[in-house]
Amino acid sequence: MTVAVWVPLLLPFLAAPAARLLAEALAPRAAARILAGTSALLAAATLCSLGLLAAAGLLRLPPVAALGHLSPHWIAAGAPGGAPVAAAAGLALAAAAALALRTGRRHRRDLAVVRAALGDPARPARPRSPGALLSSVRTGVAGRATRFRSRHRPAEPLLAVLADDRADAFALPGRPGRVVVTGGMLRALSAAERAALFAHERAHLTGRHHLFLAAAEYAAVLHPALRALRAPLGFQLERWADEAAATAVGDRAVTARAVGRAALAARHAPRPDRPGLAPAAHTGPVPRRVAALLDPRPRPRPGRRAAALALAACLALTLTAALDATTDLHRAVEAARSAGAAGR
């Protein structure tokens, strides 16, 4: 555990650049999945390592060791560092938890503000009689299988128009999701461009792109190296939706024009209150997206194979090291318990 526990904390500094390089050589859908999956896996391994370091230090405390009938000598032999390392790991976990909680609250508040503006405020819970509660439980159990199947067939996104002269359009996640557009954005686009814009935002909702963004957001809280994956992931999600919109309307030029004009309109009159987990067609590096729509020919990307091998090696080593460190701590605890029982 002494060496293995540090590997998941160090390898993200190598894995993140490799993931970015590989994403540039892949199709948008595959690139987005690679970036989001890499972020989630490395964040989970980071959380595991910090937890192991904190737990090893906690078990070395005499009251905790006595409570678990452990021999402090055997725990110290299997735990890296000492009290300073464990304290630092504990502080890092507490800070990450606080930041994640603050991020979650901010996203929830932003989504609630937009839903309230659309006339969909949160509904207060109403008291029910025991009979009504039992009836609702029976109904819920009877429809559980149907709801499970419906999760894989999301409802058709609704269209909501905000009476706002500022230009904006985004995909608001929910059940069902909504394509939110302002009057200013509608007036800035032609009918064909509006169709492409709506297809773009629907692609965000059907692809559940807000979950990809959330994974990258929370991963960046856990490890600083993973912050570098948020912007590339946002770009690839927009490219994914661009391609879906071009396929839906059957005209790449119209889609490119819609993206460009929407970005120009939003730049002249921006709306700062768009939720962070609500993807929008006019965000990200728009010139690159427009160029990719107008010239879809794949370009050779040198280093693709090397980036793929490097990323695969980093992820494999990270998982192996996290598992090895967990196994080592478990064995150390078992040995300390046996030694404690023997009075050593």
Image (cartoon, rainbow, N blue to C red):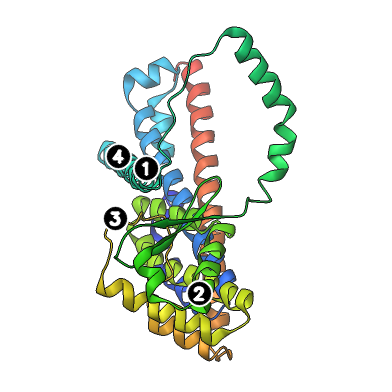
Q: Amino acid type of disc 3?
A: Asp
**Label whose residue precedes the other's in the sequence (1 or 3):** 1
**Residue ID for mark 1:** 116
Q: Is residue 239 left or right of residue 231?
A: right
Badge number at residue 98: 4
Pinpoint residue 65: horizontal percent, then vertical percent. 39, 21
Q: Amino acid type of disc 4?
A: Ala
**Residue 57 occupies quadrant:** top left
Residue 126, relative to residue 165: is it above or below? above
3D distance between C-alphas at marks 4 and 2 = 33 Å
Q: Nearer the viewer, mark 1 or mark 4?
A: 1
Residue reaching furthest to the top: 130
3D distance between C-alphas at marks 2 and 1 = 30 Å
Q: Is residue 94 left or right of residue 280?
A: left
**Residue ID for mark 2:** 239
3D distance between C-alphas at marks 1 and 3 = 13 Å
- Total marks drawn? 4
**Residue 105 occupies quadrant:** top left
Pinpoint residue 64: horizontal percent, then vertical percent. 37, 21
Q: Amino acid type of disc 2?
A: Arg
**Residue ID for mark 3:** 273
122 or 106: nearer the viewer: 122
Q: Amino acid type of disc 1?
A: Ala
